[in-house]
């Protein structure tokens, strides 16, 4: 059965329908980038909130600026903008239909429909999930860079932008001209200080064509920081089959783990949904939650990814069932990561580590090792290198994370330790492969990737430890080198 307004009352008994009258919803949010994570995270929180009879004037209008967004719009248009979410509890799968989205603007060149939707006074929040690498940051400085073809286009054509940030700037200009209060811009991407990064992208785009508008946005628009968390695999044949097993003919089902978390700054001048009623934490110390999550969860993903990838392991659950990889994760988190993560209000870091290991081990979440290995050139400098750098500042070199960096280099050579080819798995794959092959003889070739290692490459002790680890991996294999680290011999 396809989930539509007409079929909600006839859904299979095993599928939960929205617990409210969707006809009473009114839009208050435009969300750009309606992929799996958004529909398993923010949309679920709002669905729960609407079921309490709360904040029903904060429904979502979907939007996007990429070709994939148009495909998503087509998929949910035939379902009255709904899709199903299947929670993957071990031995107890459950399905629900999420009804928090009430429209999806056409995805078109120039983004006229998106700009019009965001210019509507009823819209008080514009939120985004456009991937970690989609914010046009300079990898050397971590700040906004105008040196991209799409940004240059938006500077020349601010009325017909290509980027989400150009469209947001144009909609804010429209609201300013009309005397309408600006919306809050709420980033939901997994980025350190994501509100600040989004602030810099929107203002950076605006400044290219209208410095006065940029100054107005800086003075008047709120960009709250947030930490978001829920493991949400990509949808493929398995996920489509799971939806069918629940009796659903859903073109865009989402699967996810049961756990979810959302921590935000409470900076919404024109109001917000009462999300605290459904488990969202509002705090002025998002940075502490963010550091905890990025260093332990995202860093943890990398710790299991490259040993798993080199071993030819396909699924994350299978990697966690490998005693050595699991022990490698636990040892690095315990010895090197937890000691440099600042305390978090109301959280025990040891308990959080155990929760992360439990979540990674969920056999029902068919997350892939390949997905965790994806885009290491963007993820390593965000999730791993800062911990290594902080450890050096504390005088405690991170041998495990240095070894992990060597394993990433070995992975990027393009073959696993069974001799199978690793398909390109990074936007910079060709460069990484060339560097990784050269590093087999001269490890400094790898550390010369300045966008990843920066000034850390100039640390003689780090360079020596990395060179020794990489040579050891090539000489004895990752298993033997990891065994020494786990045993405390590294």
Image (cartoon, rainbow, N blue to C red):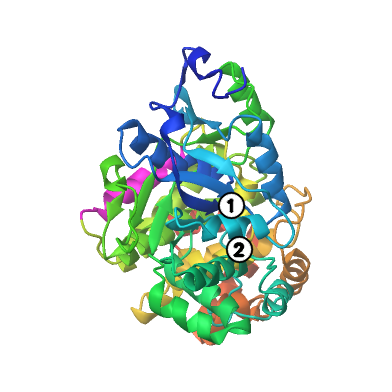
Which secondary structure lies at badge 1?
Answer: loop
In screen coordinates, is 341 left or right of 140?
Answer: left
Q: Name above or below for residue 378 compared with residue 321.
A: below
Front residue of this view, candidates 101 and 143: 101
Which quadrant holds residue 412? bottom right
Q: Main secondary structure of the magenta part?
A: helix
Residue at image point 57% right, 24% down: 4
Q: Give the quarter of the image for residue 288.
A: bottom left
Name the quarter where the N terminus is drawn.
top right
**Label 1 with label 2: CB-CB less than 8 Å:** yes
Furthest toward the left, the residue is 346
Few, some or many residues within 10 Å of mark 2 (<14, 14–19, 20+): many
Identify residue for label 2. 164
x, y percentage for residue 26?
44, 41
Q: CA distance from mark 1 to mark 2?
A: 9 Å
Question: Magenta segment range?
Answer: 346-361
Left/right of residue 105 with respect to residue 198 in the rendered view: right
Tag of residue 379: none
The x and y percentages for residue 363 are: 50, 32
User: Does the magenta run of residues contain 426?
Assistant: no
Q: Earlier in the sequence, mark 1 or mark 2?
A: 1
Q: Does the magenta run of residues contain 357?
A: yes
Q: Which residue is mark 1?
A: 33
> How many other residues sit within 10 Å of disc 1, few (<14), some (14-19) or many (≥20)?
many
The answer to whether one can see residue 96 in this image is yes
Q: Residue at x 74, y 64 (%)?
A: 429
Residue 104, above or below 293? above
State the count of labels: 2
Q: Secondary structure at mark 2?
A: helix
Give 223 or 327, whichever is nearer the viewer.
223
């Amino acid at each position: 059965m396809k989930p539509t307004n007409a079929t909600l009352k006839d859904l299979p008994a095993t599928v939960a329908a929205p617990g409210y009258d969707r006809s009473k919803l009114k839009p208050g949010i435009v969300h750009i980038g309606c992929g799996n994570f958004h529909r398993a995270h923010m949309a679920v929180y709002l669905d729960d909130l609407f079921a309490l009879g709360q904040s029903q004037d904060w429904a979502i209008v979907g939007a996007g600026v990429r070709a994939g967004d148009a495909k998503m719009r087509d998929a949910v248009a035939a379902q009255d903008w709904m899709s199903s979410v299947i929670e993957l509890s071990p031995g107890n799968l459950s399905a629900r239909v999420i009804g928090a989205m009430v429209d999806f603007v056409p995805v078109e060149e120039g983004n006229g429909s998106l700009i019009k939707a965001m210019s509507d006074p009823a819209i008080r929040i514009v939120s985004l999930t456009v991937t970690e690498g989609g914010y046009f940051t300079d990898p050397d400085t971590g700040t906004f860079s105008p040196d991209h073809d799409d940004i240059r286009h938006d500077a020349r054509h601010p009325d017909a932008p290509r980027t989400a940030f150009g469209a947001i700037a144009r909609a804010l200009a429209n609201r300013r001209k009309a005397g309408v209060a600006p919306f809050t811009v709420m980033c939901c991407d997994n980025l350190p200080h994501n509100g600040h990064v989004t602030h810099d992208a929107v203002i950076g785009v605006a400044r290219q064509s209208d410095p006065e508008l940029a100054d107005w946005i800086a003075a008047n628009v709120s960009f709250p920081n947030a930490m978001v968390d829920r493991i949400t695999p990509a949808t493929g044949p398995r996920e489509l089959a799971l939806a069918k097993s629940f009796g659903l003919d859903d073109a865009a089902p989402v699967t996810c783990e049961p756990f979810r978390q959302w921590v935000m700054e409470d900076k919404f001048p024109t109001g917000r949904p009462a999300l605290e009623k459904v488990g969202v934490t509002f705090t002025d110390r998002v940075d502490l939650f963010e550091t905890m999550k990025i260093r332990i969860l995202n860093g943890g993903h990398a710790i299991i990814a490259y040993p798993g990838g080199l071993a030819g392991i396909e699924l994350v659950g299978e990697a966690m069932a490998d005693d050595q990889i699991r022990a490698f994760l636990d040892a690095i988190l315990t010895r090197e990561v937890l000691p440099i993560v600042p305390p978090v209000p109301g959280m025990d870091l040891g308990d959080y580590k155990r929760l992360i290991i439990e979540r990674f081990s969920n056999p029902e979440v068919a997350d892939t090792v390949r997905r965790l290995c994806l885009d290491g050139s963007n993820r390593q400098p965000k999730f791993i290198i800062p911990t290594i750098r902080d450890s050096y500042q504390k005088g405690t070199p991170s041998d495990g994370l240095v070894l992990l960096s060597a394993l990433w280099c070995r992975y990027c050579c393009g073959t696993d330790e069974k001799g199978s080819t690793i398909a390109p798995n990074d936007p910079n794959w060709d460069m990484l492969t060339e560097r990784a092959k050269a590093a087999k003889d001269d490890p400094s070739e790898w550390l010369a990737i300045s966008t990843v290692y920066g000034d850390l490459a100039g640390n003689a002790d780090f360079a020596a430890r990395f060179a020794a680890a990489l040579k050891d991996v090539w000489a004895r294999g990752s298993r033997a080198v990891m065994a020494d680290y786990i045993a405390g011999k590294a």
